[in-house]
Every structure is written in structure tokens, then in C-alpha cells.
């Protein structure tokens, strides 16, 4: 029995194994196995130009078992979670959810060590845990001071424009009402993630 299982595992298609792992971590409702490679996701994505692989290509790489290349890709980190790809997908693939799964897998496997994206993500989460929303000036300042100090002067004109138009404030936002509820939701999400 053990020998048969070992043999089956040894001859298992690595692409299928990786695909099944991503689906299991995302949840069966993600429907990643239903992707027909139409390219609607990449054509809809506002960040596609900054991605090293379109979502369609990344999904083909998952099917091909290219685990390391997928987890080292910047594609999940460039996803802005607008869900436009998900809404437009003819197969109802939960593309944004898959991107979150790939980010988690990359962080857990230390597969994206040269990127500042995981650090940015953690800073954003700290903002949400503190205020219940993002604090753009604080987030940008923290991230750029830590990683891109020399780029700050070139960002100043855009920052000033956003301040003048009221799109961004200098002071931290007020905490949302219901912070206690948000903290309970976040704690429950962390517990569920730890259990899986």
C-alpha cells in the first residue's frame, strides 16, 4: 500500500500537484482549474503593464508545475485587488483570491526576498489594524523612507497635488467606528489561516 502511494506520488504530474495545492489553499470556489486561457484577465487588469507575467500566463505556469517561477513572480504583488478580472472572467475564476493565495505562499516560502512588496503589504495591514483604513501619507512615507529614499523628491509634486485636491491628508485618519468588531474579524481570519 505504501509502495503504491509512493509510486503514484512519484509519477504524479507536478503541474497538477501545484494546481491542486493552489486550489486547496484558495478554496474550491476559486475555480482555477476552469481557466480557459482566454486572456480577459490580463486585458482587464490596470496593473498588467507592471506585471512580469499576465494572470493568464501565471495560471499556465501553475499548470506546468513551475512553482519557483510562479512564487518569484511579481504578478500577485502588482494586483491591486480591484476584482475587474474576476468580474469579467467568463469561467468565474476567482482570480484576485488566487493572487492572495500566491502572495501568502510566496511569503511563507520566503520566495520573494528581493521585493519590497511583502514589506509594503505588512505596512498596509498595520495601518488597517490601527485605523481601520489606509493612511496614505504615513504608508508612503514609511515605505519610501525605508526602501526608496532617493525617490522621495521625485514623488513630491504628485504628493503636493494630492494634498491640494484633498485626495490625501497629512494627519492620520480617525479610526473607523466599530474597531472592536474589525479586530475580532481580523483575529478570526488569522485563526482560520493558522488552522489551514
Image (spheres, rainbow, N blue to C red):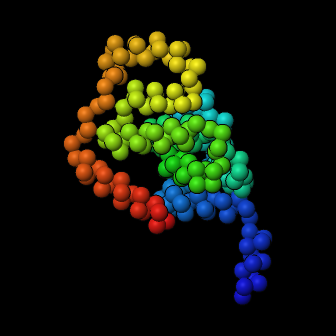
Q: Which residue is found at the position 66% from the left and 35% from the top?
A: 52
Residue 149, image x and y in percent? 56, 23
Q: Which residue is found at the position 36% from the left and 53% from the top?
A: 186
Question: In this view, which residue lies farthest toward the bottom?
Answer: 1
* Residue 41 appears in view: no
Q: Which residue is found at the position 58% from the left and 36% from the top?
A: 116
In-front residue for pair 117/1: 117
Residue 75, image x and y in percent? 60, 40
In-front residue for pair 140/99: 140
Residue 194, image x and y in percent? 47, 63
Please indicate whether residue 145 sits to the left or right of residue 15 in the image: left
Instruction: Work out which quarter of the rendered image holds the N terminus and state it.
Output: bottom right
* Residue 122 appears in view: yes
Q: Which residue is found at the position 25% from the left and 51% from the top?
A: 180
Query: What count of labels does the image hold?
Result: 0
In the displayed structure, 161 sits above or below 145; it is above
Residue 81, image x and y in percent? 46, 40
In-front residue for pair 176/42: 176
Please indicate whether residue 50 sits to the left or right of residue 95 in the image: right
Amino acid at each position: 500500500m505504501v509502495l503504491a502511494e509512493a509510486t503514484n506520488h512519484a509519477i504524479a504530474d507536478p503541474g497538477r500537484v501545484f494546481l491542486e495545492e493552489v486550489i486547496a489553499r484558495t478554496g474550491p470556489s476559486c475555480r482555477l482549474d476552469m481557466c480557459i486561457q482566454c486572456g480577459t484577465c490580463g486585458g482587464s487588469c490596470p496593473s498588467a503593464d507592471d506585471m512580469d507575467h499576465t494572470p493568464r500566463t501565471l495560471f499556465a505556469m501553475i499548470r506546468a508545475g513551475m512553482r519557483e517561477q510562479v512564487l518569484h513572480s511579481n504578478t500577485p504583488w502588482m494586483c491591486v485587488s480591484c476584482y475587474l478580472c474576476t468580474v469579467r472572467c467568463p469561467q468565474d475564476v476567482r482570480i484576485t483570491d488566487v493572487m492572495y493565495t500566491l502572495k501568502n505562499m510566496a511569503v511563507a516560502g520566503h520566495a520573494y526576498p528581493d521585493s519590497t512588496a511583502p514589506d509594503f503589504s505588512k505596512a498596509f495591514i498595520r495601518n488597517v489594524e490601527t485605523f481601520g483604513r489606509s493612511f496614505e501619507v504615513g504608508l508612503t512615507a514609511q515605505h519610501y523612507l525605508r526602501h526608496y529614499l532617493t525617490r522621495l523628491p521625485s514623488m513630491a509634486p504628485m504628493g503636493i497635488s494630492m494634498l491640494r485636491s484633498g485626495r490625501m491628508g497629512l494627519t492620520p485618519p480617525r479610526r473607523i467606528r466599530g474597531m472592536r468588531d474589525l479586530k475580532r474579524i481580523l483575529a478570526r481570519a488569522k485563526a482560520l489561516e493558522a488552522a489551514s
